[in-house]
Structures are given as structure tokens and as C-alpha cells.
């Protein structure tokens, strides 16, 4: 028989998964019942997969050999393998907050390559995971879509990125879904990933320590609002008006700025969670004082926090970073108009840390990963 369970997606469509590493505890419990096994077996299996971070039936030694043999016919998505790492040490001593960034390239079972980033802070480590292989959103400043869209990642494959890094860096306590891919374009798997990651029988990461960053799929923001999860929603806005935004992000055509901000305000109202507005500072494109003024006006009355991001240059793209004094002026204008604003340090610019860049470097060396274990 196939280990295929039906689960309800937020859009009301019944979805299925047959990958045990992508199943919630409730789903594994149903599977055990279907197999005539005791329900407590599900918690043991879930614990092995998501607390001990072992994707192998052989290691689940508190299950009888007979049960393990019975379960072997059900797939457990294999953990991605690290094929390359690079570290950055651009600590800003004056802040005493930021320690280091490491990027990890993972090879998937089908030889696709994805990237994840570890960022170490005084308060703990944060892992930025990919949700898709490639991306179909085509943002003009981003390297992730340069090789097109390949496929969605499963929840198990997203967990695998966190676990792969946590095994090397024990302090991981926060997760951001914003590496390669658009998370809300892979909605069901990302929601599954959140539920697994935050489950007390797994890694038990606080829901508030999970951030999902979208380029602005407005209808899916409403779907997410309905679930009332504790996660932090971040929206890559990058421009306060449609004309500028369209130059940067094709999705602006489908969901104009006003529609997107209405969805974001709805998310804030529904969840009482503050929404982060990500704004990449691109020289002479979106960094004028007039644009800062327009942005503050647009966000007025909502539960927002603006995060300005000095961009890393992408060699295949023409955009240049805003000079630091322009970033500071932009931030001062927003703060002066009552909009809480921070400037993110440009993390890991020396190691190709812009979205998708490390993956592209690797792909230019070889189309398929040579797995180094
Ligand atoms: S910024 Fe995000 S949504 Fe846009 S192309 Fe890159 S990965 Fe895709």
C-alpha cells in the first residue's frame, strides 16, 4: 500500500504527501493506524526524523526490526548533502551583534542544488532556507531565477536544510524562508514545514522565530492570515509605487502596491503580528527622499516595520547599491515620519550572499552536483 495521506490545504483543496519526512505528527499517527500499529509509534518516528534529525530507518533502534522492515517501503526524503560551504567574517565591531555568515550548498537526491545561509548573532543562529529549486518570479535584482524554475521543495527537504546546518551549528534557533524561491508559491509545503519545525516533538522552534518572506503574492497572504500562525511575515516591497516596482518585480503587474499593502494590513489585523517590509536600496532607482516620503505614507496606519537592505552587487545584473549616506537619509526620513525603520547590515557580501548567487557560481562550474559526503 502507499503511504499517502490526504490533508486539507488552506485553499480547501485536498493535498497528499507520501513522504514521511514531510508528514505532520497527526499524519504519521494516521499512517500507523492504517498499518495496524500503535499510535505512540508515530511520536517515536517523528522524534527520530525531526528531533534527532535522522532520516534513516536503520537508526530508529527503538522500533522493532520487523516494524522497520515494514516501513522501509515508504519513502523518507533523503537529507540534502552539503557540497560546498563558504564563510564570511565581516563582523561590525561597533555593533557587537553580528558574528559571521556561512553559506551552504546542498545537493538534493535528484542532483538539484539549493543554497542555505547560516547567520550567527550574539543571541543565537538563524538559518535562511530555500523553498524552491530556482524561482519563477524573475525579480530583476536577484540571481535565483537566472537558471529558471525547476521544482518546489518538499517540507522534508526544507527541514533537511535546517537539520544539516544545525548538526554543524548547534545554536540555530531561528529560521527564515527566503533563500531561493518564493515561499508562497509553494504554500502547502511551507505551511507543513512550519508545523513540523515548531512542533514540540521536533526541534520545537518558536513560531515567532520563523519568518516567511514573500515577493508579494497577495491572495496567498490572505490564505496565510486565515491560518493565524505565529510566524513573522516579511514582504519584499522595494518600491512605494507600481511604476518603480514593475521595473524590479514582474509580480507587481499581478498585484499592484495598494492591493499588496491591503493584504499585508489584513495579515497584521488577523494575526496581531507586525509585518516586516523589506526594501532593497538600489542606487538611483528607489532611494530618493521623495520615495521615502511615499513609502511612509503608504504604510501609515498599518502594523509595519521597515527593513532597509543595502544590496550586494550581482555581476549578471546592472543594479548598483545605494551609497551609505543615501541609505541613512532614507532611514532618517522614514523614522522622522513615525515609521519604525532599521538598516540591515549587508550580510556576507564577500561570499556571494545575495539570493541565489552561490548556487549560480556552482552551476557555472558544473550542471550537476558532485556530492561530497
Ligand atoms: S527575490 Fe525571491 S521571489 Fe524574487 S526572484 Fe529572487 S528568489 Fe524569486
Image: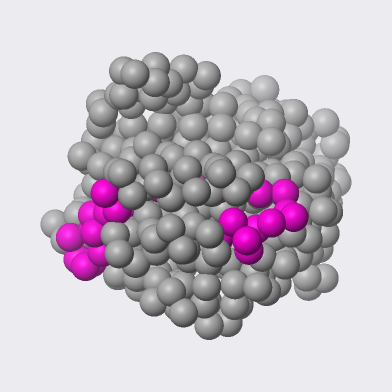
Residue farthest left in this picture:
365
Between 157 and 20, the residue placed more toward the observer is 157
Q: What residue is at 72 percent from the left and 49 percent from the top?
A: 303
Q: How is the image coloured?
A: one colour
Left or right: 118 in relation to 55: left
**Residue 106, position in %: x, y?**
35, 46
- Residue 113 seen by the camera: no
User: In which quadrant is the C terminus drawn?
Assistant: top left
**Residue 74, position in %: x, y?**
62, 51
Residue 277 higher or lower than 142, as above or below: above
Left or right: 109 in relation to 236: left
Left or right: 57 in relation to 17: left
Q: Which residues are magenta?
A: 295-323
Between 224 and 313, the residue placed more toward the observer is 313
Q: How many marks?
A: 0
Q: What residue is at 56 percent from the left and 44 percent from the top?
A: 336
Q: What residue is at 82 percent from the left and 59 percent from the top?
A: 226
**Residue 201, position in %: x, y?**
73, 29
Between 5 and 114, the residue placed more toward the observer is 114
Residue 275 higher or lower than 295, as above or below: above
- Residue 40 seen by the camera: yes
Residue 319 forms part of the magenta stretch: yes
User: In which quadrant is the N terminus drawn?
Assistant: bottom right
Residue 195 forms part of the magenta stretch: no
Q: What residue is at 33 percent from the left and 32 percent from the top?
A: 101
Amino acid at each position: 500500500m502507499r503511504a499517502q495521506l490526504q490533508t486539507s490545504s488552506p485553499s480547501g483543496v485536498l493535498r497528499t504527501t507520501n513522504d514521511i519526512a514531510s508528514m505532520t505528527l497527526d499524519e504519521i499517527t494516521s499512517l500507523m493506524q492504517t498499518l495496524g500499529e500503535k499510535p505512540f509509534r508515530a511520536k517515536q518516528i517523528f522524534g527520530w526524523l525531526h528531533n534527532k534529525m535522522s532520516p534513516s530507518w536503520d537508526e530508529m533502534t527503538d522500533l522493532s526490526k520487523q516494524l522497520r522492515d515494514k516501513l522501509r517501503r515508504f519513502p523518507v526524503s533523503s537529507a540534502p548533502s552539503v557540497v560546498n560551504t563558504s564563510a564570511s567574517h565581516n563582523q561590525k565591531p561597533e555593533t557587537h551583534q553580528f558574528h559571521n555568515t556561512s553559506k551552504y550548498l546542498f545537493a538534493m537526491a535528484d542532483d538539484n542544488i539549493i543554497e542555505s545561509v547560516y547567520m550567527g548573532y550574539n543571541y543565537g543562529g538563524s538559518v535562511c532556507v530555500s523553498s524552491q529549486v530556482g524561482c519563477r518570479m524573475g525579480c530583476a535584482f536577484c540571481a535565483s531565477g537566472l537558471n529558471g524554475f525547476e521544482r518546489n521543495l518538499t517540507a522534508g527537504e526544507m527541514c533537511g536544510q535546517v537539520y544539516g546546518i544545525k548538526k554543524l551549528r548547534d545554536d540555530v534557533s531561528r529560521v527564515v524562508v527566503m533563500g531561493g524561491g518564493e515561499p508562497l508559491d509553494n504554500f502547502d509545503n511551507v505551511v507543513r514545514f512550519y508545523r513540523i519545525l515548531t512542533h514540540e516533538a521536533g526541534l520545537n522552534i518558536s513560531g515567532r522565530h520563523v519568518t516567511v518572506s514573500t515577493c508579494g503574492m497577495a491572495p496567498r497572504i490572505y490564505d496565510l492570515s486565515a491560518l493565524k500562525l505565529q510566524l513573522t511575515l516579511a514582504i519584499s516591497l522595494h518600491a512605494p509605487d507600481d511604476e518603480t516596482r514593475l521595473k524590479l518585480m514582474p509580480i507587481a503587474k499581478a498585484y499592484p502596491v495598494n492591493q499588496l499593502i491591503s493584504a499585508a494590513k489584513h495579515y497584521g489585523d488577523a494575526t496581531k503580528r507586525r509585518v516586516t517590509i523589506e526594501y532593497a536600496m538600489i542606487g538611483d532607482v528607489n532611494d530618493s527622499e521623495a520615495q521615502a516620503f511615499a513609502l511612509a505614507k503608504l504604510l501609515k496606519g498599518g502594523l509595519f516595520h521597515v527593513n532597509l537592505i543595502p544590496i550586494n552587487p550581482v555581476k549578471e545584473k546592472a543594479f548598483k547599491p545605494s551609497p551609505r549616506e543615501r541609505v541613512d537619509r532614507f532611514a532618517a526620513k522614514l523614522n522622522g515620519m513615525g515609521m519604525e525603520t532599521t538598516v540591515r547590515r549587508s550580510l556576507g557580501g564577500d561570499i556571494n550572499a545575495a539570493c541565489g548567487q552561490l548556487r549560480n557560481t556552482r552551476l557555472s562550474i558544473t550542471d550537476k552536483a558532485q556530492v561530497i559526503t
